[in-house]
Amino acid sequence: MKKIFLPLSVALAAAAIAFPSFAKDFRPPAVPLVSVEPHFSVWSAADHLYDRETTHWAGADQAISIVLEADGVKYRLCGRRSMEVSPLPQTGVRVRANETVYTFGNGKLSAEVCFLTPRLPDDNLDVYSRPVTYVTVKVVGAKESKIDLKVAKAIATNDDRAEVVETSEQVYGAPAKVYARKVQKPFDTKGDRKRADWGRVWVAGPYAYADESMTMYMLAYENGVSARYFGETLVDWWQRDGKPFALMLEQAKHDFRDLRDRTRAFDARLAARATEIGGEKYARIAELAWRQSFAACKFVKGPKGEPYMFSNENGSGGMIGTVDVLYPQLPHLLVAGPAFVRATLAPVCDYAASDKWPYPYAPHDLGLFPVAEGQFYGMKKGQSVGGGDDDSSRMPVEECGNMLISLGALAHREGSAEFASRWWSEVTKWAQYLEKVGFDPENQLCTDDFAGHLAHNANLSVKTIVALACYARMAGMRGEKDVEARYMKMAKDMVPRWMQAAAGGRAGSFRLAFDRPDSWSMKYNLVWDRVLGLGLFPAEVADRELKAYRELQLAYGLPLDSRKNYSKNDWLVWCGCLTGRRADLAALVAPLYRYLDETPDRTPFGDWYEADCALTRSFAARSVVGGVFMPFLVTSWQ
């Protein structure tokens, strides 16, 4: 029976609206607060919200200060700017999919601080793309209370030495402080670990809700221009018809309570469904990943008026629209809805079809965030964009496979290959390229080669086999039955050859590379065979891999392969789905949960880390953590 991905709002409709309880509080390495986009992303890297200043995802201070005055006594709730004020003791923190909730109390007085950034699936894309985070403070036990929220001017610049100007506005009857760098530099600051050097940050409020003893502020980022795509300046999706920023803020204020209620209901359903799928530890991981996956992206109006979604390769080079970043994020995008998948794939396909990309394989990226002007990675110094013949560092097999599988998964989700058909000439070139060199890849770079290039990569070969089957499936949807039959037979004929070439891995697994006996690696690309119902690999392949993984994993997770002890959490969760057995997923997820709960590195959810000692590598706050939603796509459990 064919599996069809259901919109998450439908798939979770029957789930109980109740947050699961946990025996032990989960301690995220960093807690998401303002989770809008890469330039406007503020976190708390501390056990208590008042232990240290809040920071940008990359580590620079972007201080948010919250002080409560209750019956004439002041208490510090967030940040350290008001060190003369004693904190109200924090009693808990709960990270939900779209909201972070802190609780405080001293036995007589209690307070709840919430940071809410609505990122609902299958919802109004205008609401999704609003650059707004709501901050609410609810107080119980005081006759009179007052909330004072301030932000540091550093929130509006990438250069702390630059002059930032403060002005005053009004939004929905409340004052608003607006911060902007005096000398605006749109698009001058490109690449990795950057804050914006243009636009204005708004702090609107306070807004009083007396019936709830609650005060609300809105933190918002007015960038004016969002990204550049081959010379065309793009704006946020909500702004596509020229709507003024102040009007958008007024609408956000008007929608607050309705959005809050719908978001909390969704978050409860997601937590319940994730617990059902993979247990309580998996649910906490999925909740932590939801906002981070989206916060690493910009959602904009494309050159032809369609939605474009660009990721920033946070902590790993700062490229925009990287294909081997969108591929691991794909499960989250599919769960959220096909609009997000199409918006992510369209700019890559448009670039590949242009005269700016002359190669027979798919590109790696579109440039340096937030400017897409041609592939940056793997191009030699001084080389013009789209020039040169050196393929060794451009990941040709990797990216062709990623694009074909991504397009194939979208076609499966929608029951149609109409979207891929817009670029069918390019899609066919990628399949032909894999047909020629993909089964036994030569010395090409792949997304996992942190330890260097590797020829004859067995997992990359799996990607080729699955990708060719995806191409065949899409061709069949287009009515090209002869092409479908040829490429599906090609993919299936490769499977026994692969099993023979990859046999002899460690602990009964299959090899890391065809020419490396007693080696092993995560074969995460196999998961799409199960999810898409392609019927390629016999069950014994997944069974042997999982048996080995459970034997080979370390204290904090399964290493990526036999060369090093580091792991990748996206691929780790995919591997947990290979057999479809809940026990296998739980066994691989438990050490990942332990890593997040115990790592001494207080950075946003890192996807590359040492599985023996829980130290985080350089990656942080990347969209690839959306990969942890793969279990949602595996809809039937044995």
Image (cartoon, rainbow, N blue to C red):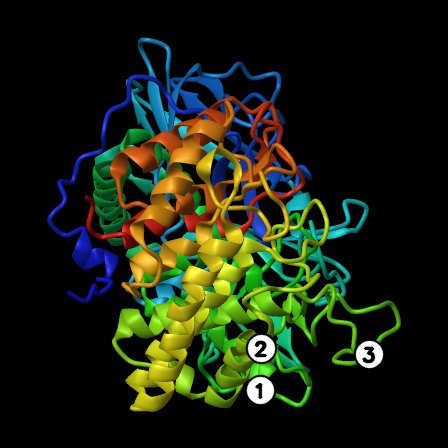
Name which residue lies at 68% across and 62% down: 444
- The Cα–Cα distance between marks 2 and 1, rounded to whole angstroms, is 21 Å
Query: In the rendered structure, which amino acid carries the disc numbered 2?
Result: Lys
Q: Residue 61 placed where, x, y %?
A: 67, 37
> Could you say whether the residue bearing mark 3 is in a helix, strand or loop?
loop
Which of the two discs, 1 and 3, labels the residue nearer the N terminus? 1
Name which residue lies at 62% across and 58% down: 456
Name which residue lies at 56% across and 29% down: 611
Q: Please determine whether, in this image, residue 486 is positioned above or below residue 403.
A: below
Q: Nearer the viewer, residue 189 or 436?
A: 436
Q: Do the residues labelled 3 and 2 touch (CB within 8 Å)?
A: no
Residue furthest right as drawn? 382
Determine if residue 633 is in view.
yes
Q: Residue 7 placed where, x, y %?
A: 24, 62
Residue to which mark 2 is pinned:
436
Determine if residue 339 is in view.
no
Residue to which mark 1 is pinned:
353
Q: In this view, does 191 lie to the left or right of 524?
A: right
Tell me the tag on residue 384: 3
Q: Nearer the viewer, residue 623 or 612?
A: 612
Q: Please determine whether, in this image, residue 636 is positioned above or below residue 48.
A: below
Picture quarter with the N terminus: bottom left
Query: How dense is the environment of label 2, judged by Cα within 10 Å: few (below 14), some, or many (20 and up)?
Result: few
Q: Based on the displayed image, in which of its 4 quarters is residue 214 positioned?
A: top left
Closer to the camera: disc 3 or disc 2? 2
Q: Please determine whether, in this image, residue 195 is positioned above or below residue 616.
A: below
Q: Nearer the viewer, residue 465 or 558?
A: 465
